[in-house]
Amino acid sequence: MAIVIRLSRQGRRNRPHYRVGVFDRRTRRDGPPIEQLGHYDPLIEDDEKKVTLNEERIRYWLGEGADVSETVRSFLKKRGIQIPTRTKKKRKKKAQ
């Protein structure tokens, strides 16, 4: 099962609020998560309160091989959490 840590949009029109969660890659944007890991409110002025993360569980899921979306990757980088780099498998070119 391909697992990814990404955002899920909550809130209402003109007042977005996002939850950080662990999802199966095939789950739709607002679908049910495997586990909630925190939240992000872009309209809060204080940068420290904008993002709340459960760092222990994030490290667990990264150890299990979860990929991370670009937005969540930037949150983790600011917190100093090391994200393992994954090499993409190169596709073999078909003989013409």
Image (cartoon, grey):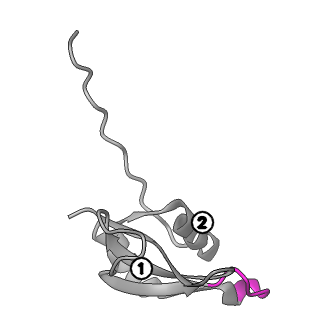
Cα distance, mark 1 to mark 2? 15 Å
Mark 2 residue element: helix
**Residue at x 60% of width, y 66% of height:** 74
**Where in the figure is residue 88, as x and y percent of width and height?**
35, 43
Question: Magenta region, mostly helix, strand or loop?
Answer: loop
Q: Is residue 46 magenta?
A: yes
Q: Mark 1 or 2 closer to N-term?
A: 1
Instruction: Give the crowd class for mark 2: few <14, some 14-19, many >=20 residues within 10 Å.
Output: few
Q: Amino acid at mark 2?
A: Ser
Q: Amino acid at mark 1?
A: Gly
The boundaries of the magenta stretch are 41-48
Seen in the image, is 13 located left or right of residue 43? left
Q: Is residue 44 magenta?
A: yes
- Asked if marks 1 and 2 touch (Cβ < 8 Å), the reply is no
Number of the label disc, if any, that sits on residue 21: 1
**Residue at x 57% of width, y 65% of height:** 71
Q: Name the image quarter holding residue 76.
A: bottom right
Q: Which residue is mark 2?
A: 74
**Residue at x 33% of width, y 73% of height:** 23
Height in image: 50 above or below 66? below
Mark 1 residue element: strand
Q: Nearer the viewer, mark 1 or mark 2?
A: 1
